[in-house]
Image (tube, rainbow, N blue to C red):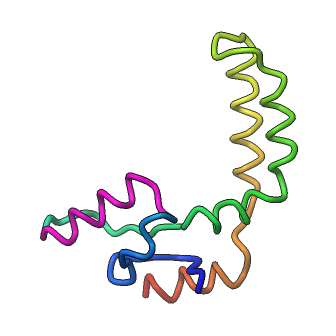
Amino acid sequence: MQKNLLLPPDFDQSDHYETGGKARHLIGMVKAGIRVPPFLILPAETVAHFMEPVQKEIDQLLSGIASAQDAKLFAVAELIKEKIGLLEFAPFLQNQIKRKWQ
C-alpha cells in the first residue's frame, strides 16, 4: 500500500526506494540513537501528485533555459518557487499531517 506520509516510527525497509537520501540518512540517525529535530517524509509519489497542478508550467519554464549559465535561470527559479508556494496539500494529507504531529 502506498504511504502518503512517513514519520520515523512508520519507516521500514520497503519505503527505501520512495524516499530521498536526506530522509534515509535522518532515519539512520534516529535508528542509531542520535537526536534529530522532528521531521516527516513525503514519498516521491506523494510529491509528484502534489506538483501535478503546476508541473507542465514548470516544465515549460525550464525548457526555455539553455544552460545553468542562462541569465533567465534566476527569474525562472523565482517563478517556479512562487507557483509551488501557492500549492496546498490535499485535505486528506493535511489531516494526516495534523494527526501525526499531535
* Residue sticking out furthest to the left: 33
- 39 and 13: which is toward the camera: 13
User: Which image quadrant for residue 48?
Assistant: bottom right
- Indicate the position of residue 75 as horizontal and vertical percent values: 74, 23
Which quadrant: the C terminus? bottom left
Q: Residue at x 71, y 11 (%)?
A: 70
- Indicate the position of residue 43 as horizontal and vertical percent values: 55, 67
Which quadrant: the N terminus? bottom right
Q: Is residue 23 magenta?
A: yes
Taking 28 as reference, is 21 above or below it? Answer: above
Give the main secondary structure, helix, strand or loop, of the magenta stretch: helix
Tell me: 17 left or right of 93: left
**What stretch of residues is rendered in magenta?**
19-33
Taking 9 as reference, is 74 above or below it? Answer: above
Q: Residue at x 40, y 77 (%)?
A: 7
Q: Residue at x 74, y 43 (%)?
A: 82
- Indicate the position of residue 6 as horizontal and vertical percent values: 46, 76
Tell me: 97 left or right of 82: left
Q: Residue at x 83, y 31 (%)?
A: 61
User: Which image quadrant for residue 65?
Assistant: top right
Tell me: 8 left or right of 90: left
Q: Is residue 92 magenta?
A: no
**How many numbered discs?**
0
Taking 100 as reference, is 60 above or below it? Answer: above
- 79 and 19: which is toward the camera: 19
